[in-house]
Amino acid sequence: MKSPLKRAIWVVAYGLVLIAPVLIMVLAPRPAARQFWRDAAVAIGYVGFALMGVQLIPTGRLPFLTDLFALDAIYKVHHRLSRIAFFMVLAHPVLLIVQNPYNLVALNLLSAPWKLRAGPIALISLVLLIATSVWRQWLRLKYEVWRVLHNVFTAGVIGASMYHIHTVGYFTALPLQRALWIAYGVVWAGITLYVRAAKPLMLLRKPYRVSEVIAERGNTWSLVLEPDGHPGHDFRSGQVAWLSTGRTPFTFAENPFSYASSEHHPGRISFAIRELGDWTGKVGALEKGARVFVDGPYGTFDMEDHPGEGYVFIAGGIGAAPVMSMLRTLDDCGDRQPLTFFYGNPTWESITFREELEAMKERLNLKLVHVLERPPEGWEGETGYITKDVLGRHVPFDLPNSVYFICGPLPMIRGVTRALHALKVPRAHCHAEQYEMA
């Protein structure tokens, strides 16, 4: 189990990093006082920009954080804090203009001094960063294109903001404030170098080769990989890795997938990948021996972090991938604890791993509940979606210490989570992971 104390320490440290510029403004020796709203605008801008900058820390996939916090929770917090940061950064020029309309001169990108132009350039970069992320699907941006744009706009926000802060130089004239922003810049540059240079170099030394590409039901491929010149790596069933193909891992074209194989066979790992467009549509064409780079494992969506007396798995579509990893791991152990798997799919023919799951029922103490949106004629099982009524008919209420793992599309996760809470399943027993994290 991960230490709640360690999590709390990191959360407190995260908060202190955000408010440190304001603390220095208030507590340290300061320049001559100015109008309150002018200094308030600066303080809000400082916190907003610091909030944007520290987003590099959780999304850098740093092991000491991904081992403590659920991966999808990290990304949810990242999305929410980025929106908050946007409004705080936007409030900075608005307050300055309201306080003194002459400050509108900074918005003239043709004639304003560069130290002032940098502010609007950073804001424009931030607007583009947020817009392309929130409306990526509406804009029909391919994942790889979005990754490139995301990094370009992020560099624009941080670079222009740092230039603006240091060249305007009112509060950064204070040695402590200047040292703080220099430290921020060093940390952000270090994380960028780690993600874009150090990590790919490490992956380059430990490539994988395609062993098999197995066609599964439901437009899904099982991509089976074996280590090339190294023993492989350990992982926990249910964790996630980022995959990239080609001659080098120095690429933006990397995609997250859950491990689908047993954790007891690190020398032969597999991922279940459904054809959903972009890179996933090319998986079936990968040839045996093709090089693949595996950046992982990450996340806490696993049985080791959430032990229980029996497990209930609830998945929709390809959300079954981490569940299969857990079931295969339990199967390898000869485990006999009670297991229940609710598996939602459109049709009987689209059920990925259907035959393997049926075979597992003979070896595991597994109750399999298929829920079909469009069942075949004569179907006597559950139909529609995984609702409160469906769960109520099959959840093992006689096992109060069961742990629930939920994985699938976000609407399904929300509906199932609400249904479990309505059925009085303790929130602490429910663990969800949205597999569309990008």
Image (cartoon, rainbow, N blue to C red):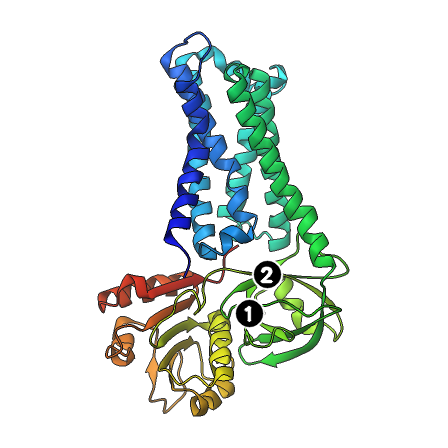
Q: Residues within 10 Å of mark 1 (few under 14, many from 20)?
A: many
Q: Amino acid at mark 2?
A: Gly
The residue at which mark 1 appears reads as 259
Counting residues from the start of the chain, the first of labels 1 and 2 encountered is: 1
What's the mark number on residue 296?
2
Instruction: Answer left or right for 28 relative to 397.
Output: right
193 relative to 300, above or below: above
Q: Nearer the viewer, residue 306 or 6?
A: 6
Q: At numbered mark 1, what does the secondary structure look like: helix, strand or loop?
A: loop
**In the picture, residue 14 is in which quadrant?**
top left
Evaluate whether residue 210 shows in this view: yes
Q: Please state the horizontal and vertical placement of residue 210, each as a whole percent of the image.
A: 71, 73
Cα–Cα span, label 1 and label 2: 10 Å
What's the mark number on residue 236?
none
424 relative to 382, above or below: above
Q: Nearer the viewer, residue 375 or 333?
A: 333
Q: Residue furthest top?
A: 32
Residue sitting at 46 percent across and 89 percent down? 358
Q: Residues within 10 Å of mark 2 (few under 14, many from 20)?
A: many
Evaluate whether residue 251 shows in this view: no
Q: Nearer the viewer, residue 330 or 358?
A: 330
The answer to whether the residue labelled 1 contacts the one labelled 2, judged by CB atoms less than 8 Å apart, is yes
Instruction: Answer left or right for 114 relative to 338.
Output: right
Q: Amino acid at mark 1?
A: Tyr
Q: Please state the horizontal and vertical placement of residue 351, each as a whole percent of the image.
A: 48, 80
187 relative to 133, above or below: above
Q: Please state the horizontal and vertical placement of residue 92, each as a whole percent of the image.
A: 44, 24
